[in-house]
């Protein structure tokens, strides 16, 4: 099942996408889904990202990426956060803050959308609290990440967390192909089976630290191949059995 949030006629409801038609949900997709009976063609709406209260991300969760960043893979997951104000949807613009940064990178990732209020969840039961999966781009001002010595500013700019195009509920995240393309050229090409800490382990680790709420998003880490974006670039993250998230880079006014 593909769950979408969309904009139409001044409203932003959720729905279930099937064969280019959206069946509208009466409230939200967390728990039992109830349909209103209304149907909307996909071509008539603008897809929106999920609405997380928080975005929790994992750094250096692919060995090759840890090494390309100049270090060895960490023994435990590295947690950081991105503000909810950084979230944008498919087709929205990534805004390049050129007055503050001269190196903005793409980082294609598998994102997990939480479906239930939870804390202290074991890896064995993690699937019970997951609504589904989507594509993410952990956009990063790389020069600021290095100069600041921590990651909040570099990863927290408005528009630096594209998510979408929808939430896929029926997929096994254990071994999915993940690719990032810039202007059609493949820059990252890996599989989620290479994650150092898989999804269940990440949820166990994070939920020992903080309560996770329905709609929260967990970014699982990026594979090797990260690199710079330029104003005017089109960047796409494609994950097998989920879909493609595409955004264009624009200058900050």
Image (tube, rainbow, N blue to C red):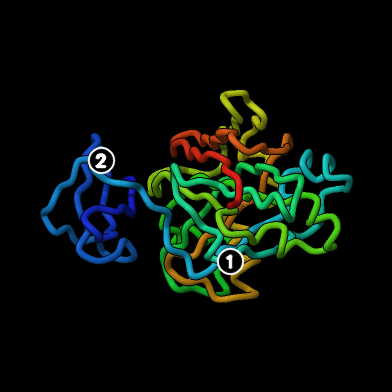
Quarter containing the N terminus: top left
Q: Residue at x 58, y 66 (%)?
A: 83
* Closer to the camera in the image, 174 or 52: 52
The numbered mark, 2 or 1, whose residue comes first in the sequence reads: 2
Q: Viewed as shown, does residue 141 lie left or right of 49?
A: right
Q: Is residue 131 left or right of residue 193?
A: left
The vertical placement of 203 against 240, above or below, is: below
Say which quarter of the image contains residue 5. bottom left
Q: Residue furthest front?
A: 253
Task: Write down the quadrant of residue 152 in the picture.
Answer: bottom right
Q: Nearer the viewer, residue 193 or 235?
A: 235
Q: In terms of depth relative to the viewer, which is nearer, 176 or 183? A: 183
In this view, the residue farthest toward the top is: 185
Residue 181: x, y in percent?
59, 30
Q: Is residue 176 above or below residue 135?
A: above
The residue that disc 2 covers is 42
Q: Is residue 65 above or below residue 219?
A: above
Question: Which quadrant of the structure image shows residue 237?
Answer: top right
Dot 2: element: helix
Judged from the image, the secondary structure of the residue bearing numbered disc 1 is: loop
Within 10 Å of disc 2 (Cα), the crowding (few <14, some 14-19, many 20+) is some
**Residue 169 percent coordinates (x, y):** 38, 49
Residue at the (47%, 65%) spot, across then down? 52
| CA distance separating discs 2 and 1 | 29 Å
Q: Write down the residue under mark 1.
A: 83
């Amino acid at each position: 099942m593909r769950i979408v949030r969309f904009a139409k006629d001044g409203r932003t409801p959720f729905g279930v996408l099937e064969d280019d038609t959206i069946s509208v949900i009466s409230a939200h997709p967390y728990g039992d889904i109830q349909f209103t009976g209304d149907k909307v063609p996909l071509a008539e709406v603008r897809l929106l990202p999920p609405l997380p209260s928080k975005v929790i991300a994992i750094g250096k969760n692919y060995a090759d990426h840890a090494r390309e960043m100049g270090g060895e893979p960490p023994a435990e997951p590295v947690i950081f956060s991105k503000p909810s104000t950084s979230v944008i949807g498919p087709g929205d613009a990534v805004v390049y803050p050129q007055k503050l940064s001269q190196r903005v990178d793409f980082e294609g990732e598998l994102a997990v959308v939480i479906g239930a209020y939870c804390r202290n969840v074991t890896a064995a039961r993690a699937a019970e609290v997951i609504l589904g999966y989507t594509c993410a781009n952990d956009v990063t001002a790389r020069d600021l990440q290095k100069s600041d010595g921590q990651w909040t500013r570099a990863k927290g700019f408005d528009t630096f967390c594209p998510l979408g195009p929808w939430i896929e509920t029926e997929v096994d995240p254990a071994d999915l192909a993940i690719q990032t393309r810039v202007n059609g050229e493949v820059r990252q090409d890996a599989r989620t089976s290479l994650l150092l800490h898989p999804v269940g382990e990440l949820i166990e680790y994070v939920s020992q630290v903080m309560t996770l709420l329905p709609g929260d998003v967990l970014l699982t880490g990026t594979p090797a191949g990260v690199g710079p974006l330029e104003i005017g670039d089109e960047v796409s993250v494609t994950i097998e059995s989920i879909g493609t998230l595409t955004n264009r880079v624009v200058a900050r006014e």
